Image: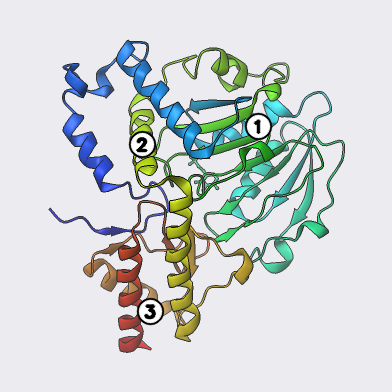
């Protein structure tokens, strides 16, 4: 069996030790005689798995006591609707920051529920830079400010937390949560689909300040209201038990590796190596402003798109997979989440240099 170097954007690489543990526990979890997939979500075994996962996540992110942690379903896309449904309130006004493809989707969904003010947009730069906070036009009456800390497709990332003057800040952390420490107390709500940097698809993390729960708009479907999920510990209905369990194993693994400060250090080194290779090549190009380049998703283009197919097939032959850019932008993209090792990036960089030698 050969494991490849996996640069998929999502679903994405998982730590091999986690997969091995899943394999070892698959048929008989801790003497229960069954797989986690086959257990009642209300039985004591799964309740213990769920509680441990939450505790480890709280430790990793130093989540303050006055925040609830939810393990929901429906992906980040469901949060595009749940956030306005639960947070817009009577005033029905919210600020959104438009930095690329994912914030665009969040914006178009929010518009169904109220007035959306685009307080800042990266459109002028072709979404190759984050609009500086000095250019933002925030609405002091807004119920919240929504932004996308890491645009998974464009590869632009905030390396700072916006200042909102007391208005709750909401972040779609789908592709960057757990890549480094984050000061949760600066946020009203953080959400993330798991399948980028957290665990398998199927579970969505929501970290919400408790005073923001319980104000859903009239007519909000129960399943889209945070309050019953908080009251029922994310078990208002049957949760995605297996994904929740695997995410919990990832949390324990991250703790054992030294937590998020250790992840930040290695993730920054991985990104630096790849961007340096691109910038010094005179062959590959990354269009993003240097200060706003993502540590997680690194898009790059070749001098001639006619080389793309050759690049991808030679990369595949070298055991490097998942490098095709998003269909909306073309080119290449290397997603280098926590589970992608420094060695994987070194191998990619060596391949890129070799490819350039032969085709440059
Ligand atoms: C992948 C992604 C989404 C969509 O996630 P789903 O879980 O597929 O709904 C939303 N926002 C960002 C930033 C993403 O990377």
Compared with 86, 316 (above or below) is below
User: Tags 3 and 2 in contact by the CB under 8 Å rule?
Assistant: no
Q: Tell whether 19 sits left or right of 81.
A: left
Could you say where residue 10 lies in the image, as x and y percent from the top left? Answer: 41, 49
Residue 53 to residue 167: above or below: above
Q: Position of residue 8 (x, y in %)?
A: 37, 55
Of badges 3 and 2, nearer the viewer stands 2
Q: What distance separates the C-alpha of mark 3 from that of mark 2?
A: 42 Å
Q: How far apart are marks 1 and 2 (CA)?
A: 29 Å
Neighbourhood count class around disc 2 (C-alpha, 10 Å): few under 14, some 14–19, many 20 upward: some
Please identify the residue farthest to the top as the structure is shown: 43
Q: Residue furthest left?
A: 1
Tell me where residue 105 sits by quadrant. Answer: top right
Residue at point 69%, 31% (across, down): 84
Mark 1 or 2, closer to the camera: 2
- Residue 241: x, y in percent? 36, 24
Characterize the local packing of mark 3: few (<14), some (14-19) or many (20 or more) Cα atoms within 10 angstroms.
few
On the rendered structure, is 331 left or right of 348?
right
Looking at the rendered structure, the secondary structure element under dot 3 is helix
Contact, mark 1 vs mark 2 (Cβ under 8 Å): no
Q: Which of marks 1 and 2 is nearer the N terminus?
A: 1
Q: In which quarter of the image is the C terminus?
A: bottom left
Foreground tag (3 vs 1)? 1
Disc number for residue 170: none
Sequence-earlier tag: 3 or 1: 1
Tell me the residue that label 2 is attached to: 252
Dot 3 or dot 2, earlier in sequence: 2
Residue 225 appears in view? no
**Residue shown at 50% from the left, 49% from the top:** 175
Label 3, label 1: how far apart the Cα atoms are:
42 Å
Dot 1 lies on which element? helix
């Amino acid at each position: 069996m050969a494991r490849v170097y996996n640069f998929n954007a999502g679903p994405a690489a998982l730590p091999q030790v986690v997969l091995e543990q899943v394999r070892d526990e698959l048929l008989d979890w801790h003497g229960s005689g069954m797989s986690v997939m086959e257990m009642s979500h209300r039985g004591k075994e799964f309740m213990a798995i769920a509680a441990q996962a939450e505790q480890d996540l709280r430790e990793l992110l130093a989540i303050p006591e006055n925040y609830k942690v939810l393990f929901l379903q429906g992906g980040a896309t469901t949060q595009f609707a749940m956030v306005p449904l639960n947070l817009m309130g009577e005033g029905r006004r919210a600020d959104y920051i438009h930095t690329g493809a994912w914030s665009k989707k969040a914006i178009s969904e929010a518009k169904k529920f109220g007035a959306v003010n685009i307080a800042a947009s990266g459109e002028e730069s072709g979404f190759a830079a984050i609009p500086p906070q000095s250019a933002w036009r925030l609405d002091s009456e807004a119920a919240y400010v929504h932004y996308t800390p890491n645009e998974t497709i464009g590869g632009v990332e905030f390396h700072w937390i916006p200042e909102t003057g007391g208005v709750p800040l909401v972040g779609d952390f789908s592709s960057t949560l757990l890549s480094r420490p984050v000061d949760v107390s600066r946020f009203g709500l953080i959400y993330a689909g798991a399948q980028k940097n957290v665990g398998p698809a199927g579970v969505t993390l929501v970290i919400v300040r408790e005073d923001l729960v319980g104000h859903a708009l009239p007519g909000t479907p129960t399943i889209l209201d945070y309050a019953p999920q908080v009251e029922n510990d994310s078990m208002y209905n049957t949760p995605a038990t297996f994904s929740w369990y695997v995410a919990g194993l990832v949390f324990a693994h991250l703790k054992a590796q030294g937590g998020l400060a250790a992840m930040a250090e290695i993730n920054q080194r991985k990104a630096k190596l790849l961007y340096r290779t691109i910038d010094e090549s005179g062959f590959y190009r990354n269009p993003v402003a240097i200060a706003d380049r993502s540590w997680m998703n690194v898009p790059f283009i070749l001098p001639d798109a006619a080389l793309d197919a050759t690049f991808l097939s030679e990369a595949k032959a070298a055991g490097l997979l998942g490098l095709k850019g998003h269909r909306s932008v073309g080119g290449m993209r290397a997603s280098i989440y926590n589970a992608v090792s420094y060695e994987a990036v070194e191998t990619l960089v060596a391949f890129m240099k070799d490819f350039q030698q032969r085709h440059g």
